Amino acid sequence: MKRLRDNTHIILWSLLVLFVLSMTIGGLVGGADITDLFSSKKKLQGKAGIVNSNEFDGMQYSQLVQNQLEQYRENGQEITESIVERVTDQVWKSFISETLISEEIKRLGLQATDWEIYEYLMQYPPEFLINQEAFQTDGQFDRQKYIQALTNPQSDEWLGVEQYLRGLLPFQKIRYLIENLPAVSDAAIQEEYIKTKVPFTVETLFFPFSLVVADSVDVSKTEIETYYKENRDDYFVQETRELDYVYFELKPTAEDSLSRYELVTDLKNRIEKGESFETVAAEYTEDPSGKNSGGDLGWFDQNQMVAPFTKAAFALNKGGISDPVLTQFGYHLIKVEDKRTQNGQAQVKARHILLKITSGPETLDNVRSKSSLFAFDASDIGFEAAADSHNIEIKSTGKINKNNSYIPGFGSFKRAIQFAFSDNPVGTISELLGADNGYAIFKLAAVNPDYYRPLDEVSESVKSTLMTNKRTGNLENIANQTFNDLKSDGDFKSIAISVSGIKYDIHNDVMLSRPLKGISRSDVITGTLLALKDGQFSQPIQVGNQYVIVKRLSASKIDEKDYGVEKEMIRDRLLKRAKTDYYNSWLAEMETDAKVIDNRDNMY
């Protein structure tokens, strides 16, 4: 017991450090006068941004980004430009949401009492405590050990956990309050059951867009000019910019491939001399799923793996280890642990070690050196002269938009977009920028101001729009006339025969949760069929540029026994969806009303 308490003291203080490093972003903010900050760029130096009056310190922002990137590295993932972009956006969005929620928590006076913290620890031990060896027996969480440590605290070893929960519980409280506002009625539950479990038989008259041929409508020059004037904003083009660039691709060389081959061969030798395959796999494999399983792949047949891997694995005897196997993923070392035949198919149970063929340090240094030298020369003698001197091709991105992080030829490349739309003049050369698979240097080649596309440039597009509108309007008239004709006898099939081009269909035993055959999914159609009685038909329903009239022939009766079984499960499903939607809408509304300055691009 004394040993447990001693260990607990060390562990909980270690967790206090962990808590400080991984504390919620809401704890990293400080106050500021938002009106002053909006008017003074100097006061934004060293700050990632501001939400209302809450500042996000730039150093803390950077630390949180690095912490998340380190988790990617620990999971064996290569840090690419797109991952960096995703992480930085996640950290920033988390700061916004947690800051706004913190303000609401303060406004409502929500706190975590000592009793609530104690009860939470008793009922819901945090994951990081469950995984501590001091609270385990034979590798499993031992609740008795945990309760003993919790009810017999020594000194202040639980302080870090207490502080963590004192910050966490108010967030859970406010989420609980918001999510308990929506409710689900019995009528909504029954409707959901009907849509998914009750078969309907439906007739449809479908009016395809092709029913009104293009030659049947005409558009005058005056109509085109009028439409253009009334909808000129539709032809507004935002400012675009163009970049010239040179790219130094980072790709493995033959020497890199040989180096990985030699390493995987060395690993095989070590295993053959007595080291455990599982232990070596856990240390060296670059397959993330195999790190914690010793490379275990379980059972698989000859159709589940790529051809070279399959051929090597099924050629081995039980207990055999392959020579290095090359696939598009890299070099593999395969160990077959068992063989069997199941359902007429041969299967093997195997482990593997994967070594990806990546650029080695020498290749990295070589590419970095070449790209850095070009960047230096470009700033010294000019972009074009440097490209000519280095005998490297200059490429162009074409026109790019500020709101799009995608760069042709690169994919997602936010830093390049930031450079393109900085305040620098045309001709400015960027610093060396790391891309996902290499390095790039950009030159701002052109700035194209925003403008309205002139009428002569868009007249054909306007004419096409007007023709579509007229054809759709004429189609609506045909559908309405057909609806009036149906009022006399309601015979869908006869009407379809008498009017060329209308498509008749009968849909037997269909579920309303799925689209009717040949007709796009429409909530209006679903709602209409639910509202109609057997034998009734609808007015024309627009689906895109087409129309449909639906007739409900019959609907099966609700299976009351099955409904009784399903009812509460449906309620839970709908309520869960309603709670999530309501909470997200509440948060989105706060974010819309907030005063936000994103200063990440100008921090340093």
Image (cartoon, grey):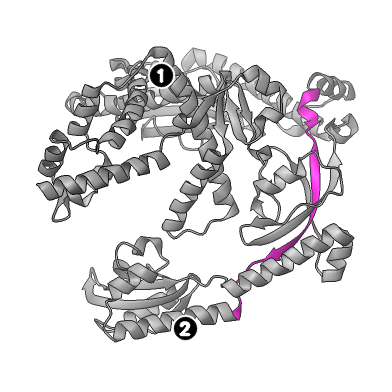
* Magenta part of the chain: 232-254
Q: Nearer the viewer, residue 480 or 530?
A: 530
Amino acid type shown at disc 1 = Ile
Please give the residue where the numbered disc 1 appears in the rendered image: 105
Magenta run includes residue 252: yes
Cα separation between marks 2 and 1: 59 Å
Q: Secondary structure at mark 2?
A: helix
Q: Is residue 508 above or below residue 269?
A: above
Q: Residues within 10 Å of mark 1 (few under 14, many from 20)?
A: some
Q: Nearer the viewer, residue 342 or 86?
A: 86
Left or right of 208 on screen, residue 4: left
Q: Position of residue 368 (x, y in %)?
A: 68, 66
Magenta run includes residue 175: no
Which quadrant is home to the C terminus? top right
Q: Of marks 2 and 1, which one's residue comes earlier in the chain?
A: 1
Q: Which residue does the image show at 31% across and 46% down from the upper left?
A: 14
Please give the residue where the numbered disc 2 appears in the rendered image: 262
Q: Which residue does the image show at 16% across and 45% down from the upper left?
A: 5
Q: Nearer the viewer, residue 590 or 92?
A: 92
Q: Position of residue 440 (x, y in %)?
A: 72, 58
Q: Which mark is residue 153?
A: none
Q: Position of residue 138 (x, y in %)?
A: 13, 56
Left or right of 390 on screen, residue 92: left
Q: Is residue 75 above or below residue 306?
A: above
